[in-house]
Amino acid sequence: MDGFMMDIIKGMCIMDNDGNRILAKYYDKNILSTLKEQKAFEKNLFNKTHRSNTEIIMLDGLTCVYKSNVDLFFYVMGNAYENELILLSVLNCLYDSISLILKKNVEKRLVLDNLEIIMLAFDEICDGGWVYI
């Protein structure tokens, strides 16, 4: 069975437990097109999620799924109408890939030390907002 491509991802982001960006990639140039807009969105996103026990939030017209670790937060963003389960699958793929790269020791220091290969994982999971399903 052949897969197909779906344009569902608007952005992926990793932040530390202080809300600082470690790595972020945005795919839709019509939303969050400037660094200033991205940083403001990320600050708002972190403020709304860092104390929450949920996995999903609607923010500024985007559906955001996220997962937290010891000192990191992982986010995947899609349009408000996107299927949350697909976004969650992409998030789990991102987290599991990074966990394999870092030999299940996912922490800020190791992410920063291995940033180049983690950026490659970002690119392999999502190509310009398209996900191979």
Image (spheres, rainbow, N blue to C red):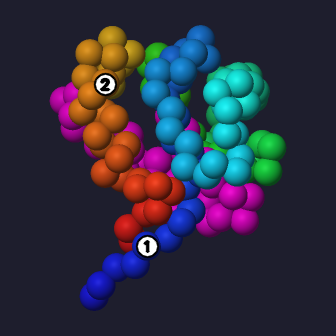
Q: In this view, does 54 lie to the left or right of 48?
A: left
- Residue 78's spot in the image, x, y percent? 63, 54
Q: Which residue, as the protein is rendered here, is positioned at the far bottom?
A: 1
Q: Would residue 92 be counted in the magenta stretch?
A: yes
Q: What stretch is highlighted in magenta?
A: 74-103
Quadrant into which the C terminus falls = bottom left
In the displayed structure, 119 sits above or below 71; it is below
Disc 2, SS = helix
What's the residue type where badge 1 is placed?
Met
- Residue 32's spot in the image, x, y percent? 69, 40
In the displayed structure, 102 sits above or below 17; it is below
* Rendered residue at 50%/70% (across/down): 6
* Rendered residue at 38%/68% (across/down): 132
* Rendered residue at 72%/65% (across/down): 81
Q: Would residue 37 be counted in the magenta stretch?
A: no
First in sequence: mark 2 or mark 1? 1
Q: Which residue carries the number 2 mark?
A: 115
Disc 1, SS = strand
- Residue 62's spot in the image, x, y percent? 72, 50
What's the residue type where badge 2 is placed?
Leu
Residue 14 in view here: yes
Q: Along the line of sight, which residue is nearer the eye, 72 or 111?
A: 111
Q: Is residue 50 left or right of residue 88?
A: right
Q: Which residue carries the number 1 mark?
A: 5
Q: Is residue 55 left or right of residue 109?
A: right
* Rendered residue at 47%/21% (across/down): 22
Residue 112 lies in what quarter of the image? top left
